[in-house]
Image: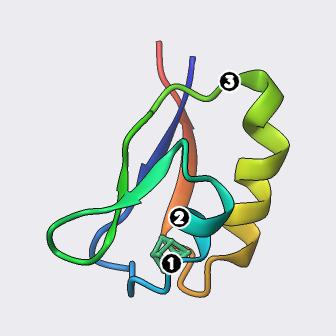
Amino acid sequence: MEKVKVIKEKCIGCGMCVGQNPGYFSFGDDGLSTVIKEDVNPDDKASILESIEMCPTEAILIEEEK
Ligand code: SF4
């Protein structure tokens, strides 16, 4: 199963991912992006890959987890 992650140390809270994929990302109390749904639905993968490309600090990644 592929999981989406945000590296908090890299996120600058620009909101791009939250705006594009609100089903996966939300702002935490710290004002930074927090993953609210880790498991990547195959139908959503292209859109998440777009968020990964658009993130200015490369804070988002998808990992394969067993
Ligand atoms: S696009 Fe990147 S920097 Fe912007 S809020 Fe999302 S994870 Fe943070």
Queried on whether the Cβ of the residue with tag 3 lies below 8 angstroms from ligand 1, the answer reads no
Q: CA distance from mark 3 to mark 2?
A: 17 Å
Name the amino acid, label 3: Asn
Classify residue 53 by image quadrant.
bottom right
Q: Are marks 2 and 1 in contact (CB under 8 Å)?
A: yes
CA distance for labels 3 and 1: 21 Å
Which is closer to the viewer, label 3 or label 1? 1
Residue 18: mark in rendering: 2
Asked if disc 3 and disc 2 are in contact, CB closer than 8 Å, the reply is no
Report the side of 52 relative to 35 (left or right).
right
Q: Estimate how packed mark 2 is, as few (under 14), some (14 to 19) or many (20 or more) residues with alpha carbons within 10 Å.
A: some
Quick one: quadrant of the N terminus?
Answer: top right
Tag 3's secondary structure?
loop
The residue pinned by badge 3 equals 41
Specify whether tag 1 is near ligand 1 (CB below 8 Å): yes
Asked if residue 46 is positioned above or below residue 14 in the image, the reply reads: above
Q: Residue furthest top?
A: 66
**Sequence-first disc among 3 and 2:** 2
Q: Which label sits on residue 15?
A: 1
Identify the residue at image location x=84%, y=45%: 46
Question: Vertically, is 11 above or below 25?
Answer: below
Give the vertical position of 59 relative to 14 (above or below): above
Give percent across and percent down for residue 35. 39, 48
- Label 3 with label 1: CB-CB less than 8 Å: no
At horizontal 79% and vertical 50% (from top left) the residue drawn is: 47
User: Which one is in front in this view, the residue at disc 3 or the one at disc 2?
Assistant: 2
What residue is drawn where x is 79% and y is 61%? 50
Is residue 5 toward the left or the right of residue 53 in the image?
left
The three-letter amino acid code for the residue at tag 2 is Val
Mark 3 crowdedness (10 Å alpha carbons): few <14, some 14-19, many ≥20: few
Question: Looking at mark 2, is its residue's CB closer than 8 Å to ligand 1?
Answer: yes
